[in-house]
Amino acid sequence: MLNVSIYRYNPEVDSEPYMQDFKVDTQGKDVMVLDVLEKLKAEDPTLTFRRSCREGVCGSDGVNISGKNGLACITPLSEAVKGNKLVIRPLPGLPVIRDLVIDMSQFYAQYEKIQPYMINNTPAPAIERLQSPEERAKLDGLYECILCACCSTACPSFWWNPDKFIGPSGLLQAYRFLADSRDTATEERLANLDDPFSVFRCHGIMNCVQVCPKGLNPTKAIGHIRSMLIRSAT
Amino acid sequence: MANIRTMSFDAVIVGGGGSGMRAALQLAQSGYKTAVITKVFPTRSHTVSAQGGITCAIASDDPNDQWQWHMYDTIKGSDYIGDQEAIEYMCQTGPEAIFELEHMGLPFSRTEEGRIYQRPFGGQSKDFGNGGQAARTCAAADRTGHALLHTLYQGNLKNETTFLNEWYAVDIVKNEDNAVVGVVAINIESGETVYVKSKATVFATGGAGRIYASTTNAHICTGDGVGMALRAGFPVQDIEMWQFHPTGIHGAGTLVTEGCRGEGGYLINKDGERFMERYAPNAKDLAGRDVVARSMVLEILEGRGCGENGDHVYLKLDHLGEETLNAKLPGILELSRTFAHADPVKEPIPVVPTCHYMMGGIPTNVDGQALTIDKDGNDQVIQGFYACGEAACVSVHGANRLGGNSLLDLVVFGRASGMFIEKQLREGINLKDARESDIEAAMVSLNRINNSAGGEKASVLRAELQTIMQNYFGVFRRGDFMKEGIEKLNALRPRIENVALEDKSNAFNTARIEALELQNLFATAEATAIAAEGRTESRGAHAREDFQERDDENWLCHSVYFPETKTLGKRGVNFNLKTREAFEPKVRTY
C-alpha cells in the first residue's frame, strides 16, 4: 500500500489547510500521479483538483509532487515516490481556492501583459506570410508552452514579485513573439519589458528549466531578451 | 422564483475550444458584446490534443492541388451521407480560413519555399481519386491543435473577448416561442448560478468520447451540448456515427496521430506482416479510418494480434530514422515513451482502435443555425440557437470523418457561425424575454442534483455506462447485442438520475460538475444506442454484423433522434453543389 499525503483545504469548512493521509493500493503498477488522484476522488468526491487531457498537453494538472512541480498526468510514481510516500500539494506561491486548485489570475495577468499575439500591421498577402524553415526553427522550444505554471510557481523571483516580474512562462512567450520573423513589433515589445522588474528580476536560478514538463528552457529565452534589451539600449 | 442574477450579451458561446473561440473572435472583432462560457481555461480545451494537422487545399505541397479534390475525398470518406453543400463550402472557404490563422501567428511548419508544410493523411487523393495519394494536411509538427488553440486564444485576447473561464453551462433557457435565449450557468469557483442571457447562443461544446471506456478524448469531453439540447427537446443527427481512431496507445487510450502513417509509418500484426496491404491494396495504411480500424479488429479477432493477450497491433516507425521522427513527430516520441514505455526510434508502438470522434451532433445549416424537423419532415430553424465544431452535425463528416478535417470544420464553421450571427445582430434580433418559469425550467436538472439525498457515486455509475457502451456499441455492432445494451441503459437511467451529491459546498465543487456531466454522458449514450440499433445497414463507422451491406435504398440519409419520443427519424442528405453536379454514391474502396 502506497502512503499518500495530500494538501486539503475547503474554505467553507476548514479554518486552515491540513495534510490528509491516504493509503492507496496501486497493485505494484507504475501508474501516473493523476491515476492515484482519480482513484482517491472516486472514493472521496470532495477531493478537488483540475485535470483534462491526461496526456501532458493541456496544462491543467500542475501540482507540487513530493517537492517538485510537475504535471500529475505524466509523472509516474517511480519518479515521485520517496520511501513509499507520495506528497501532493498545490503549486506554491499563488492563493489556494480549494485543495490542489490554485487561483492563477496573477499568472495569466503576466501572460497578458506581454501582448501574447502576433503584431504585424503590414497588409497581409493573399496566401500565408512566407517563413523559411530556419526562421521557423527559432520558435521551437518556445511555442510549445502549455501555461501550466509549473515554472513560474517554482521561481523565487516570481514568489517575491508576482505582480511585477513577468515570470519564466510569460517571458518564454514574450521571446516567442520577439523571435518570430513575421512579427514587426520588436521595439514596442522591448520597450514594454524595459524596467527593473519585468525581466531583470530573473537571477538565473533555473528552477523553471528543472521543472518544465515540456522540457523547455525559459532561462535561455530570458537571456536572449536581456541581450536584445542591452543591444537596444546602446 | 428562480431568483438568480442575469448577465446579458449579444452573443454567448458555450465552449472555449477551436470552434467556439473562432466564432467568438469573429464576433468580438465586429464589436458585439460577446462572452465565452468555458468549463476549463480555454487553452485546456480538447482541441489542444489534435496532433497531425488541418487538411486544406492550400496548394503548398502540390501547386496544382484543387479544393474540389478535397471535396471529393471528403464526400467519399463520409460514405455519401455528408451534406455536399456544406462540404463544398468547407473545402472552398478553407484556404482563406487557414491563411487567416497563419496571419494571426499560428506557427506552422514550413517547406523550403517558406510555405506551410503539408503531409499526407488517410483518404486523400489527387484528381478525384485518380491521381494517387495527396499531401494536404497543414501541420505545426505534431502539435497542430495546440498551436491552433493557443493562436485563437491569443487572437481573442487581442480583441478583448469576455471569457467566463471555469463556468459550466447547465441547461438551455427557452422562451415561450421555443426560441433559445441563453443558458443557466454555474461559476465553478464561487458556485453562483447565473442566467446568461443572449440574443444568440452558440454551442461549441465539443464531443463526448467519454461515453466509452477506451477513448482518446480528454476527461472533459462529456457531451454537454448534446445533453443540453436533448433535455431542451431538440433532436440530434447521425449520433450513431462514432469514429474509432486506429491508433490509440494500447492500455492508455492516448492518441497517436495518423500523421505517423502519413510520414511513412505502417501497422504490423504479430507475424510482422503489413496487413493493410490485404485490406486496402492501394491506399494501404492511409485508407479511411473506419476501414483501418475494422481491419485491425479483424486481425486481432483472427488471432494475429500482438502482445501477451493478442489484443493489439503494432505501429512501426523506427525505419523512418531518428532525425525525421524528432523533426516531424516529436510529440509522439514523448507520448509513446511515457504511456507505452516504447521508444519509437527503436521499437513499434502498441496500438488499438480507440473511440475518438463524434460525427453526429446538433443538426445545423451552413450558417451554424441549429435545426429541428417539423411534423411534415421539413427543416425548421431553432431561433437563437447555433452550433459548430464537434457538437454540431453540419454535416461535413457524414458516417466517417477524414483525418485533419475536424480542425478545418472548427475554424470554417466557427467563422461562418460568427459571420452569420454578426449579420443577424446588425439586422436586429428580437426574441421575447424569458419568463421566470422559463428560467426555472432550465434549473430542474440542477435542482434535482443539488437536492440529492442518497444515490450512488458518480464515478461508479460513469464506469458502468462506459462499459456498456464499449461492449455493446463498439467497432462492430449487432442488433440483438444492441437491444441488450439498450435494456442495460434503461436499467441504469434511474440510478444516474438519482446520482449522489453528498458535498453541497459552493467553492470549486467538481463533484457537482461531474454529477451534471454524467447526465450529459448518459443522454448522449442513450441517443447513440437507439440510433445505432435503428440504422439497419453498415455505412462508414457504423458496421453491423447483421446488416453488412450499405443500403442506399433505405439509408442514404441522416438519422434524426428525437428525445421526447426516443424515436429515430430520417432526414435527406444535401446533394446541392453550387459549383458542379453532385457526386453520386459509389462503392467505397481504398
Image (cartoon, coloured by chain):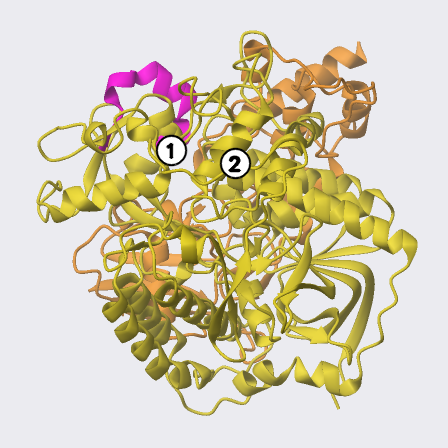
Chain colours: A orange, B yellow
Numbered mark located on residue B583 in the image: 2
Disc 1: which chain? B
Q: What residue type is labelled 2?
A: Phe
Q: Which of B86 and B338 is in front in this view?
A: B86
Distance between mark 1 and mark 2 Cα atoms: 26 Å
Q: Is mark 1 on a helix, strand or loop?
A: loop
Element under label 2?
Answer: loop
Q: In this view, does B33 lie above or below B504?
A: above
Nearer-N-terminus badge (1/2): 1
Determine crowd level at label 1: few under 14, some 14-19, many 20+ residues with C-alpha closer than 10 A.
Answer: many
Q: Which of marks 1 and 2 is in front?
A: 2
User: Bounds of the magenta span?
Assistant: B315-332
Displayed quadrant of residue A103: bottom right
Answer yes or no: are tags 1 and 2 on the same subunit: yes
Picture quarter with the C terminus of chain B = top left
**Marker disc for residue B258:** 1
* Identity, as a three-letter code, of the amino acid under mark 1: Glu
Q: Chief secondary structure of the magenta span? A: helix
